[in-house]
Amino acid sequence: MSGDHTPKPLIEGPGDQLQGSFSPDGRFVAYASSESGRFEVYVQTLPLPERKWQASHGMAVRRDTIRITV
């Protein structure tokens, strides 16, 4: 195999991103991020981040108990 095999971040942005979960068809990833100042759930398209939206609104997601089911 040729080409660049350097690992690259799948999700980048302000704050911390954690607890990612892929959709069964592989078209989306859901994850928790603190980019809004508190942990919320976001969904992003794959393989390229063409679209991203916040899936939780006003819900503080506890960092130690996050479970995402897509």
Image (cartoon, grey):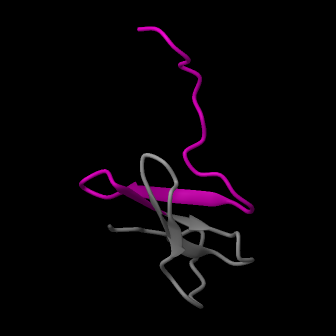
In the image, residue 12 above or below residue 53: above
Q: Which residue is found at the position 62% from the left and 59% from the top?
A: 17
Q: Taking 66 as reference, is 7 left or right?
A: right
Q: Taking 19 as reference, is 36 left or right?
A: right
Q: Which residue is found at the position 41% from the left and 8% from the top?
A: 1
Q: Residue furthest front?
A: 50
In the image, residue 5 above or below residue 39: above
Q: Which residues are magenta?
A: 1-30
Instruction: Examine the structure image and report whether residue 27 is included in the region drawn in magenta.
Output: yes
The spot of residue 22 in percent (x, y) is: 36, 55
Magenta segment, principal secondary structure? loop
In the image, residue 20 above or below residue 59: above
Looking at the rendering, in which quadrant would you find the C terminus?
bottom left
Q: Which residue is found at the position 56% from the left and 88% from the top?
A: 59
The spot of residue 18 in percent (x, y) is: 57, 58
69 or 6, nearer to the observer: 6
Q: Which residue is found at the position 56% from the left and 17% from the top?
A: 4
The spot of residue 3 in percent (x, y) is: 51, 13
Dividing the picture into quadrants, the one containing residue 37 is bottom right
Q: Residue furthest left?
A: 25
The spot of residue 68 in percent (x, y) is: 40, 68
Q: Taking 55 as reference, is 33 left or right?
A: right
In the image, residue 44 above or below residue 42: above
- Figure disc tally: 0
Q: Residue furthest bottom?
A: 58
